[in-house]
Amino acid sequence: MEILPRIRKWFLKKFRMEKVSVLLALLVVYMPPLWAQQYLTMGVGYSTAFLGSDELNLFKETYNAVYDPLLLEGMRGFGASVGLQWEIGYRRMGRLATAFLFGARNCSGQDIAQFYNGDSRRLKIDIQSYFIECEMGRTFKNIYVNGLLTLFFKREITLYSRASQLQPKEALGGTYEGITSFSTDLGVAIGYFKDPIFLTCKITYPLFTGGGSTALRDNSPEKFRERTYFFPDDYEAYLSGGFFHGVKCNIDGLKILVMAAFAIKIKK
């Protein structure tokens, strides 16, 4: 009688193993191929960035408050700043998609206040940086969806401040510069590939932006003599001689990028 349970146990174990083997065989037969085509890519793109910071927002609010009765149109912030990007790198396209890219990006935007008497205040910002980017995700025929992480380094920020028909102190004219050691963005890349062109749309948002301890400054001799070398975060305090902070170099924001890249096959 003890033999029957053993036979039954052996039979069930054998059946389960054979069933698993059949399932594995079916998976191997019907699974999308794991081959991957590798490419070197070279591309250019157009970017839009919504730049801002707490200090810039405070400057905008205090400037508009000081000149409110005289303003035809107040400062609104940089809004959608635009720029260009180039990149070179490596892409691997199979069931899984990966990419490692290196490149440079610039971005430029401006904010203008208009007075009833025709005067104006103009702020212009330029940001230039290099970056290293890593992508990883899935492909669906000719479409790929990747998560991405971007490390920006040597991020140089220049803020140009100009005003017409105002006293020098009120005008706050100058060229204020600063460098951020690095910053990181996290986002998604959605693209379409048809040999030999990659078309990619990327949306990223800052995960960390350095420069929080460094202020934008104008290093001209006259600014040092007047002790006005920092671009102020509080315009009202700046005019009254009160206490204010300089606008920090951690100016950043949401970025949207459209890229077109030419691909060269290197291995299959």
Image (cartoon, rainbow, N blue to C red):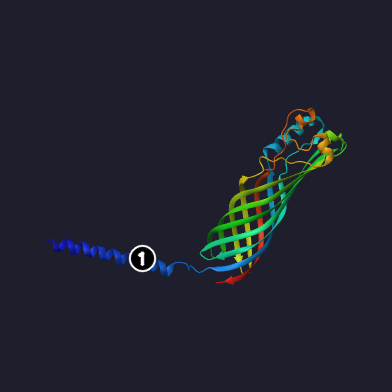
The picture places residue 97, in percent across and down from the top left corner, at: 54, 62
Where is the C terminus found, in terms of image quarters? bottom right
**Which quarter of the picture shows residue 120?**
top right
Residue 223 appears in the figure = yes
Against 95, is 127 above or below? above
Front residue (pair 231, 28): 231
Front residue (pair 162, 202): 162
- Residue lying at the far left of the rendered structure: 1
Where is the N terminus found, in terms of image quarters? bottom left
Task: Please indicate whether residue 20 sits to the left or right of residue 94 in the image.
Answer: left
Against 204, is 121 above or below? above
The picture places residue 263, in percent across and down from the top left corner, at: 63, 67
**Residue position for label 1:** 23
Against 13, is 126 above or below? above
Task: Please indicate whether residue 32 sits to the left or right of residue 54 in the image.
Answer: left
Residue 172 appears in the figure = no
Secondary-structure class at tag 1: helix
Q: How many marks?
A: 1
Mark 1: amino acid: Leu
**Which quarter of the picture shows residue 163?**
top right
Task: Please indicate whether residue 68 sits to the left or right of residue 203 in the image.
Answer: right
Q: Residue at x 69, y 45 (%)?
A: 51
The picture places residue 193, in percent across and down from the top left corner, at: 60, 65
Q: Residue at x 69, y 49 (%)?
A: 155
